[in-house]
Image: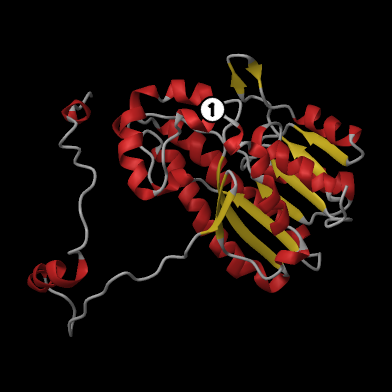
């Protein structure tokens, strides 16, 4: 047991298994009191893999202090979750938004229900948790919000709603850092890569897009899972240390940033910046853009996604 977070109170959503469970355990081992939140509906063919009460009991049996919550971390449940933590422990210092849900489909087949479910948890739910946590977080000398984004935000065929929501999380993180910094609240995001109990089930569910994902995602750094990812190399436990470290006073100078965590590597990702620019008095015309684009603005770009060497992937199925 450490003491880096003695006296702190944390909420971890989606903590009934996988990455969230590791966050909760490590927070507790450093002295934080933890509200373990999870609906408990994540399943594999072997059964339920998420259970908030089970994780809370594990923490308590190990000498920590945790309470479970099975309230949905969405717009409707966020206020209740925050109040549960405050009622149990009297304050709130740390919010880790880790809950997730998603559907896979072709863009032209995606339903509104599938879109709303995915965005409702991964973006709207994160905002709702922040909204209700902030009045409590600002009462402390230093408080922390960690949002879980994803490499899917770089672009992920079959996962349009999820990738849109997770990239929205980055904008939410940057805004929260800028807006809440004056109150002593820091906000950072992670893009974790881990293999857990649901990985095999996900591979089965997305099998029809396996080739498309492997070809189109690799150039942008979001490589699709491979058979090598099923071992200890990308264990969920390897995500938690960076997340918990960001919650400590050692990281008081870090806010508004995004970190990619993959196995034994933690990377700080760059913030958007201008790659190239052109200028013309009184604005650019179409003729000017025709002239400039090849010489200055887009000459180094290529369309990586035509897939002309894979006619089997160019067949459109309504």
120 vs 109: above or below: below
Give the farthest residue toward the top. Answer: 46
How many residues crowd around disc 1 within 10 Å: few (fewer than 14), some, or many (20 or more)?
Answer: some
Residue 29 placement, left or right of 292: right
Q: Residue at x 19, y 25 (%)?
A: 312
287 vs 71: above or below: below
**Quadrant location of the C terminus in the rendered image:** top left
Q: Position of residue 216 (x, y in %)?
A: 31, 41
Residue 3 placement, left or right of 287: right
Q: Residue at x 63, y 43 (%)?
A: 98
36 vs 2: above or below: above
Q: Residue at x 51, y 45 (%)?
A: 150
Q: Residue at x 57, y 38 (%)?
A: 194
From the viewer's side, name the closer residue of 289 and 29.
29
Residue for badge 1: 199
Q: Position of residue 215 (x, y in %)?
A: 30, 37
| Residue 198, quarter of the rendered image | top right
From the viewer's side, name the closer residue of 56 and 235.
235
Q: Position of residue 183 (x, y in %)?
A: 72, 70
* SS of the residue under disc 1: helix
Give the farthest residue toward the bottom. Answer: 281
Q: Position of residue 97 (x, y in %)?
A: 64, 47
Residue 116 placement, left or right of 243: left
> Number of callouts in the render?
1
Residue 313 placement, left or right of 235: left
From the viewer's side, name the closer residue of 217 and 112.
217
């Amino acid at each position: 047991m450490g003491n880096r977070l003695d006296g702190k109170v944390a909420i971890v959503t989606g903590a009934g298994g996988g990455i969230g469970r590791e966050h909760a355990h490590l927070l507790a081992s450093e002295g934080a009191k933890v509200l373990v939140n999870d609906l408990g509906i994540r399943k594999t063919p072997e059964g339920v893999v998420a259970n908030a009460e089970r994780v809370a009991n594990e923490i308590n049996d190990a000498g920590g202090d945790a309470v479970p919550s099975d309230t949905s971390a969405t717009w409707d449940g966020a206020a209740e979750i925050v109040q549960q933590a405050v009622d149990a422990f009297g304050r709130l210092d740390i919010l880790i938004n880790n809950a997730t849900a998603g559907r896979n489909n072709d863009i032209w087949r995606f339903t509104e229900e599938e879109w709303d479910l995915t965005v409702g948890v991964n973006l709207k739910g994160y905002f709702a948790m922040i909204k209700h946590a902030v009045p409590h977080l600002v009462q402390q000398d230093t408080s922390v919000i960690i949002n879980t984004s994803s490499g899917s935000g770089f672009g992920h065929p079959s996962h349009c709603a999820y990738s849109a929501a997770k990239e929205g999380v980055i904008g939410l993180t940057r805004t929260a850092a800028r807006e809440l910094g004056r109150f002593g609240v820091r906000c950072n995001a992670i893009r974790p890569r881990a293999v857990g109990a649901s990985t095999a089930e996900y591979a089965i569910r997305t099998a029809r897009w396996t080739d498309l994902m492997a070809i189109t995602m690799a150039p942008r750094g979001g490589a699709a899972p491979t058979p090598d990812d099923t071992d200890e190399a990308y264990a969920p436990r390897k995500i938690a240390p960076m997340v918990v470290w960001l919650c400590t006073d050692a990281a008081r100078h870090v806010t508004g940033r995004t970190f990619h965590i993959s196995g034994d590597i933690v990377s700080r990702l760059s913030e958007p910046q201008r790659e190239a620019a052109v200028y013309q008095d009184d604005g650019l015309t179409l003729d000017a853009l025709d002239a400039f684009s090849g010489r200055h603005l887009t000459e180094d770009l290529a369309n990586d996604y035509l897939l002309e060497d894979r006619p089997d992937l160019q067949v459109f199925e309504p």
